[in-house]
Image: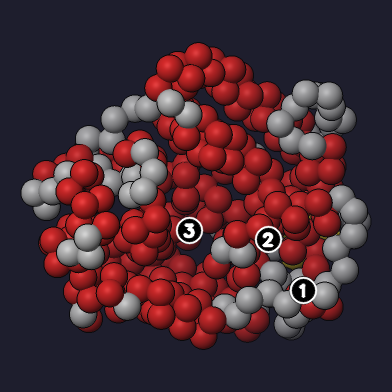
Amino acid sequence: MSHSLPPEHAVLGPPFDACNELAAAKNANLYRAAMRLSPERQRFFLAAYASMRVIDDIVDDGFLELPDAERDAQREFVLQTIHQWQAQVIAAKADLDNPLPENGPLSAEVYQALRLTLGRSDLPADPWIELADALHRDIAEEPMDEWDDFIAYCEGATAAPASIFVYLLSARYDAEIGYTSPLTNPPLYHARDMAIFCYIIHILRDLPEDIKGPDRLVTIPSEVLIAADITLGEIRNAIGQGKYGDLDYLGKILLEHAWEHFETGQARSGELLSVLDTDEADTLSRLFTVYIELGGAMMENGYAGFLTERDEIMQSTAQNSLPDVKKD
């Protein structure tokens, strides 16, 4: 039985409208994919995504953008903020009143939305806790020396949020029971490797923007930079001067890692098909296709060729598979 609903017909209502404002701000591929789901699962996604967006923005767009001295001064405060955020998430999962209604990082609306969804589901709070672990790494500014460091970071930063989306693809909603999933393996099992594949493609896609910021915001491990015989400063200069050929070997190394995870991820996501309806399987396929086509473009003409045609390729791949969500 199919039960997805086009997003323009879904009525969200409070407190989910506030979550939608946060989640829709970047109109990311995952957001556009999730808004193809049924209204009840849209609400769960929006509550989850908004709750994660809040704390991620505090760290990425707030703390990590600060000069060195200000980061040193703010580090303990931001760590405490993550602790408060995690306490709110755990309370929402337990369907309890907001433990920090006045000063918690989650607003009253986002907290209530999370309580009405996560708090009425069989999904544990593990993805939020794993994200908090990744953010602790960011705040501590732990060096990302080896590929294993990168994978450990991905477990919380990208695989954990992706596991929520996998859960929602399979979940069924009942007004009396709430949200339940028939998955026999944890959602992370199905999400992990495809999430890592997509994240590597995401890094390569967004490198021209990310390299403009501080080095600490570029999540490429030192091991890869050494293998590619390039520094972040040289990447910055190559992009600034349009010398994309200097980045071809870096792209090749990262793409090889990406496709290794793709093979495992494709097999494990394929195992989902037995519990997904046609619409959910189509949504999952559309989301993956965006990144598969981006990766394919990087392989076909080399990373330098991709960077030359980057804007056009990004526009066509996203719109072909996941058109922009219509807004009233």
Q: CA distance from mark 2 to mark 3?
A: 22 Å
Please state the horizontal and vertical placement of residue 261, each as a whole percent of the image. 31, 61
In this view of the protein, can residue 205 be seen by the observer?
A: yes
Q: Which residue is more in the foreground, 15 or 307?
A: 307
Per the rendering, the mark at residue 24 is 2
Please state the horizontal and vertical placement of residue 144, each as a whole percent of the image. 28, 35
Mark earlier in primary sequence (2, 3):
2
Dividing the image into 4 quarters, which one contains the C terminus? bottom right
Q: Which residue is mark 3?
A: 191
Q: Which residue is mark 1?
A: 327
Q: Tell me the kind of residue under disc 2.
A: Ala
Please state the horizontal and vertical placement of residue 80, each as a whole percent of the image. 61, 19
Mark earlier in primary sequence (1, 2):
2
116 vs 293, left or right, is: right
Residue located at (17% from left, 44% from top): 231
Q: Which residue is more in the foreground, 96 or 11?
A: 11
Q: CA distance from mark 3 to mark 1?
A: 29 Å
Q: Tell me the kind of residue under disc 1.
A: Lys
Q: How is the image coloured?
A: secondary structure
Q: CA distance from mark 1 to mark 2?
A: 10 Å
| Label 2: element kind | helix
Are circles 1 and 2 on residues that touch, CB within 8 Å?
yes
| Label 3: element kind | helix
Q: Nearer the viewer, mark 2 or mark 3?
A: 2
